[in-house]
Image: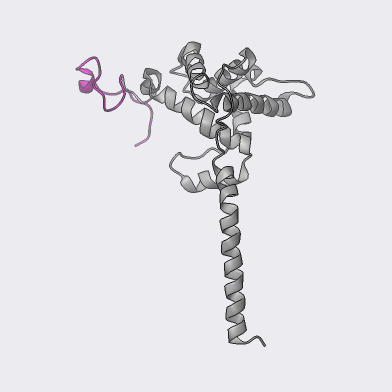
Amino acid sequence: MISRRNFLLTAAAISATAVAGTYVAMPHLRRIMRPELDMTYPLGALQDVEMRNIIALCETLIAPESKPPVEFFHDYVNTVTQSERGFLKEYQRAAALLNATSTGMYGQGAQRPFVDLSHPQRDKVLQTLLWRYPANDRIVGKVEKLSAGLDAIALRIYVMGPLIGHYYRSPYGWAVVGYESFPGRLPLDPRAYTRVLPDKGVAS
């Protein structure tokens, strides 16, 4: 029978090993949960085929009833990739990931670019790469980061997140939630606040 002293020493040693292992693993876990931008990667613009895949991604993410012109996202992506280091690589990697996944799912032995898929097919590609959950569900978000691929997590953080933010900061995004101007800012028409918002079909 193990003595109380030996038991305590063994338990302490196991705890110390676990803590040390966690400490050593922390940088690796951080890289998995939030991949870092490659700040050494040059600035530049996407190739046409890459841009068309990214525009197709944007069209999949936005509300179909409030669709901006192609230039809305095209100009935004060009501004980011030509002014912020690391983002050109992330957009290129995102376009390649979308192509590889769409080809694997729908190519049947041939190349099947993401841009050539139907809207439901594009949506299924994204569901294959990433989980769908409420934005405020941090627990599921963390579990996803541990289970999804590094490229998929980078797609969500550095490409999809900023694109969705760009959309919902614009009049196209405001219209989805029934506003004519960004909430908290004065609209051009001072009578806007006296009008009844349109019914969006949300159950009470």
Q: Is residue 144 visible?
A: no
Q: Quadrant of residue 110?
A: top right
Front-most of 112 and 13? Answer: 13
Q: Quadrant of the C terminus?
A: top left
Question: Is 192 above or below relative to 145?
Answer: above
Left or right of residue 44, residue 198 in this image: left
Q: Residue furthest front?
A: 40
Front-most of 21 and 104? Answer: 21
Does the magenta run of residues contain 192? yes
Q: Is residue 11 visible?
A: yes
Q: Quadrant of the N terminus?
A: bottom right
Residue drawn 48% across the image and 25% down it: 163
Residue 202 at x, y percent in the picture: 38, 32
Residue 13 at x, y percent in the picture: 60, 72
From which residue to which does the magenta span run? 181-204
Residue drawn 52% across the image and 26% down it: 85
Left or right of residue 122, residue 162 in this image: left
Residue drawn 57% across the image and 20% down it: 54
Residue 32 at x, y percent in the picture: 59, 44
Q: How does the figure colour the protein chain or chains?
A: one colour
Predominant secondary structure in magenta? Answer: loop
Question: Is 121 above or below relative to 5?
Answer: above
Front-most of 77 and 114? Answer: 77
Residue drawn 59% across the image and 78% down it: 9
Q: Give the mark count.
A: 0
Q: Quadrant of residue 34?
A: top right
Residue 144 at x, y percent in the picture: 57, 44
Question: Is 158 above or below relative to 145?
Answer: above
Does the magenta run of residues contain 184? yes
